[in-house]
Structure formats: C-alpha cells, structure tokens
C-alpha cells in the first residue's frame, strides 16, 4: 500500500534538470522529429530540458492518492484532486502487466486505463507480436465522444528501428494521419534517420519530412532535427556523478519563434538530496528540491516556478510514501 499527497506542482512536472525523454524518433513541435532514449539498438540516452507541465498550479491545491496491488501483475490507483483554483476531480487508474519480461522496464502484454469522474477514458494496450515487433493501441474519449484512436507498430533490428503510426483513421470521413520514421545506427556513436508525416482530410492533404541525427559520446549527447517546420538542437553533458547540465534550442519557422532553455541537476548523495533547475528564454525560472527522509520510506519534494514576463508564480509540494 502506498499513498502520496502533492501540491500544485509535483516533482514529475516541476523541473527536469537532467531527465530523459521516452520514445524513439517522435514528432514534436514545428513538425520536427526528436531522437529519444530508452530503446535498445540505436537508442541512447538523450536529454533536453523539459518545461513545466500543465498540471503545475497554485499552492492551494492537493492530490491525495492511494494505490494497491491486487496481484503480482495488477494494480489499481485512486486519486482525488482538490483545488480552490479549479474544479476538483477523481481518477481511477488500473494497470495490468503480463509475465513476459524483456528488460527491467519492459513487460508484455500491458494494459493501462484511467477514467475520471466525468466518464472520460484514456487507455493503452501494448503487445509483443514477435521478438522484434511491438504494437500499441491508444484510445481517448471525452465523456461519451471518441477523441483519439491510434495504432502503432514498431520493428527493432540489431542496428535500426522502424515505426508506423496510424492516427484517427476515419474511412467514412476520408481523414487519416500517418507517421513513419526510421533510425539507423551508422556507427556505435552516430544515429541518423528521418520522419514523414502525412495527413489527409476533406479539402486538405499534405506531408512533412524531418531529418534527425544523434551523436553519443562518453559523457555527452548531442541531437539535431531539421524539417519544414523548423529546427531543434539539444546538448546534454554529465560533468561528474553530482553535476549534469543540458541546453535546448528550438526554431519554429511557421510561428517565427525561437526558444532557448538551460537546465541542470545537482546530486547530493550524502544529504539524500537532488536539486533540478530550469531557465528559458520566456523569462521563466524554476527549481525542484527532492529530499529523502530515511529510515522512513518518504520523499519530500518542493517546487517553484516564476515567469517574469507574465508575472506568474507557481509553487507546490509533494510527499511520496512507499
């Protein structure tokens, strides 16, 4: 049994000084592809600063949660969010994980579902069709109306990865979004690839091509993505066991906008503390301090964000037990 209570902004969305992003060559802002970490073969660790998530709110809110494992592979979670700044909500989450374990973080099949008090559903189904082929289905509804239905298929070779995504296919409405991307390990350190996005709906049809590359060294990782919508570059450097830094630059030609972000993470193992900080070109600064409280299985996190341009300040706390 585990329970957690959080304030306006928890450690997950607060700042991610040196966090990694999940996924392969995925579509980002401005029609770009970003090479991500966490995969076998050509995938390597890549980091870029993450901005505060939409859940970051004022300090006058709370989200107590309780979770319980029904069996070794099933888990249910109840979350109640109470706030004076917006409507309160309740979420029921259920997760089932199969017994086919491919790695520390990979097990198949996997079913994840989340439903709130309004009846809106978010569900994912992941299945291993063959040793090298993975499939995923995503469904999202807003009350009784379907919003998203998406199907993914991925092939992982010894030195390459190919993925095809079909989003919101509608035969009657003649609309569809098709995303295909491919990554190839040229050397043990260099990965090159590309992504093509095709969309069609009545009266509109088009395609966007994005090229992506990633170079992984012993202590740093650099990525570059160039496409029709703009360019994105990131650099991550691990100075030592205590200090990690990263920068991110993104240029959007359609919006005529360029953003820059700098993030860092300080690990203090002797004090059981981790600090993450963020500074970007939108005049925003933020930080999160995580403190473990041994011998109790408790972690305390304090986070705060300030946007000087919009004169907005958000802060919150999180207490995690378990």
Image (spheres, helix red, strand yellow):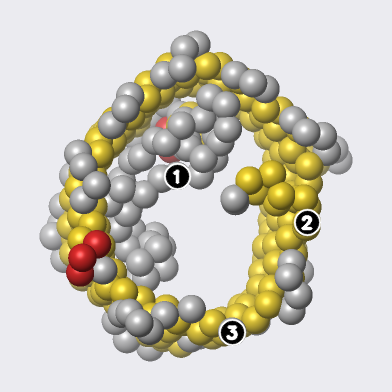
Distance of mark 3 from mark 2, alpha carbons?
Answer: 22 Å
Q: SS for tag 2?
A: strand
Question: Percent from the top left, x then y, of residue 262?
Answer: 21, 44
The residue wearing badge 2 is 99
In front here: 168 or 127? 127
Q: Residue at x 41, y 80 (%)?
A: 297
Distance of mark 1 from mark 2, alpha carbons?
Answer: 26 Å
Please name which of the two marks, 1 or 3, marks the residue nearer to the observer: 3
Q: Residue at x 74, y 67 (%)?
A: 73
Count of numbered tags: 3
Looking at marks 1 and 2 on the same chain, the residue that comes earlier in the sequence is marked by: 1
Q: SS for tag 3?
A: loop
Instruction: State left or right for residue 173 relative to residue 82.
Output: right
The residue wearing badge 3 is 1
Q: SS for tag 1?
A: loop
Looking at marks 1 and 3 on the same chain, the residue that comes earlier in the sequence is marked by: 3
Question: Percent from the top left, x then y, of residue 207?
Answer: 60, 22
The residue wearing badge 1 is 21
Question: Percent from the top left, x then y, of residue 247?
Answer: 24, 38
Distance of mark 1 from mark 3, alpha carbons?
Answer: 28 Å
Q: Is residue 227 visible?
A: no
């Amino acid at each position: 049994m585990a329970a957690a209570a959080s304030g306006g902004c928890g450690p997950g969305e607060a700042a991610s000084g040196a966090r990694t992003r999940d996924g392969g060559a995925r579509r980002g802002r401005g029609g770009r592809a970003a090479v991500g970490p966490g995969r076998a073969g050509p995938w390597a660790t890549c980091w870029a600063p993450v901005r505060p998530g939409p859940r970051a709110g004022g300090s006058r809110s709370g989200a107590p949660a309780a979770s319980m494992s029904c069996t070794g592979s099933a888990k249910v979670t109840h979350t109640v969010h109470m706030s004076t700044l917006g409507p309160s909500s309740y979420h029921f989450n259920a997760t089932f994980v199969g017994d086919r374990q491919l790695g520390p973080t990979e097990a198949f099949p996997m079913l994840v579902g989340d439903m709130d008090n309004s009846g809106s559903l978010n569900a994912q189904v992941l299945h291993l069709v063959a040793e090298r082929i993975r499939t995923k289905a995503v469904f999202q509804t807003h009350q009784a109306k379907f919003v998203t239905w998406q199907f993914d298929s991925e092939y992982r070779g010894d030195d390459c990865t190919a993925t095809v995504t079909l989003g919101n296919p509608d035969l009657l409405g003649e609309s569809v979004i098709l995303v295909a991307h491919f990554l190839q390990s040229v050397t043990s350190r260099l990965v090159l690839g590309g992504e093509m996005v095709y969309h069609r709906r009545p009266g509109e049809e088009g395609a966007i091509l994005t090229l992506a590359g990633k170079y992984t060294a012993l202590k740093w990782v650099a990525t570059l993505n160039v496409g029709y919508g703009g360019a994105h570059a990131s650099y991550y450097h691990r100075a030592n066991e205590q200090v990690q830094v990263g920068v991110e630059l993104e240029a959007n030609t359609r919006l005529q906008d360029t953003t820059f972000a700098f993030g860092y993470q300080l690990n203090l193992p002797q004090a059981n503390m981790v600090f993450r900080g963020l500074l970007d070109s939108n005049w925003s600064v933020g930080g999160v301090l995580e403190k473990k409280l041994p011998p109790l299985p408790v972690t305390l996190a304090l986070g705060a964000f300030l946007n000087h341009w919009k004169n907005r300040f958000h802060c919150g706390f999180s207490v995690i037990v378990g």
